[in-house]
Image (cartoon, rainbow, N blue to C red):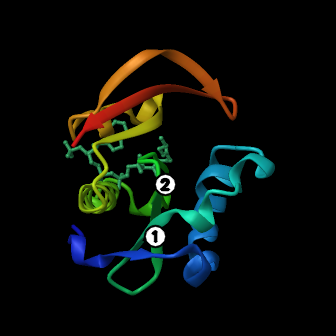
Amino acid sequence: MSISSSEVRIVQWQDEAPALSAIRKAVFIEEQHVPEELEWDEFDPVSIHALAVNPFGAPVGTARLLPDGHIGRMAVLKAWRGRGIGSAMLQRLLDEARHRGVSEVILNAQITAAAFYAKFGFQTSGNEFMEAGIPHVKMFLKL
Ligand SMILES: CC(C)(COP(=O)(O)OP(=O)(O)OC[C@H]1O[C@@H](n2cnc3c(N)ncnc32)[C@H](O)[C@@H]1OP(=O)(O)O)[C@@H](O)C(=O)NCCC(=O)NCCS
């Protein structure tokens, strides 16, 4: 089953915090064992968030775009991966970034997700580093 970009909404943290945080809790805290105190930070209220809902209207994916052009917290519930949801959210946030005049999008990719971002033209920069106990690499995309 594929999902069209029309099923990805752009939302504010204050309006959808329960849905957004439930997905991140399941993926980052429970599945990837990211310490809870590292997951929540001061950037959520100032970011715009992608919220993907499945054909039944249930929230299944999220990601955020910070005001400085950083994309992060990209997560799709395990049962819903591999159906284009992550791609639809990333495309939507790249469109938003362009719309806001961002010239370069930067992200810290988990090494295992670098190939996902590379499909969108992201290039790696520098060496691997550890963040929240997970190997990462910096990636960037000029818009
Ligand atoms: C990374 C993630 C968001 C991708 O979401 P998704 O909905 O499965 O992605 P899509 O279905 O849009 O996949 C798009 C393409 O990227 C590929 N891809 C997706 N995740 C990948 C991964 N971890 N490694 C390599 N390729 C990947 C898919 O195979 C697909 O390729 P195709 O177009 O040739 O079929 C999802 O795997 C996830 O939530 N992972 C756990 C959290 C995480 O690691 N987040 C990234 C933090 S940097």
Q: Going 45% across and 27% down the picture, which residue do you hit?
A: 138
Image-quadrant location for residue 25? bottom right
- The residue tagged 1 is 60
Give the number of marks: 2
Q: Judge: label 2 CB < 8 Å from ligand 1.
A: no
Determine whether the residue tagged by mark 2 lies in a helix, strand or loop: loop
Q: Residue at x 39, y 19 (%)?
A: 125
Question: What is the CA distance from the residue labelled 2 to the residue labelled 1?
Answer: 21 Å
- Comparing 111 with 43, the one in front is 43
Which amino acid does the dot numbered 2 rest on? Leu
Label 1 is placed on what type of residue? Answer: Val
Give residue 6's position: percent from left, percent from top: 23, 77
- Where residue 31 appears, as percent x and y from the top left, is 63, 49
In the rendered image, the residue lying farthest to the top is 127
Callout 1 secondary element: strand
> x, y (%) of residue 109?
46, 34
Q: Residues within 10 Å of mark 1 (few under 14, many from 20)?
A: many
114 horizontally vs 88: left or right: right
| Camera-side residue of 47 and 117 | 47
Q: Residues within 10 Å of mark 2 (few under 14, many from 20)?
A: some
User: Mark 2 sits on what residue?
Assistant: 66
Instruction: Report the disc number at residue 3.
Output: none
Q: At 35% across and 23% down in the image, what residue appears?
A: 124
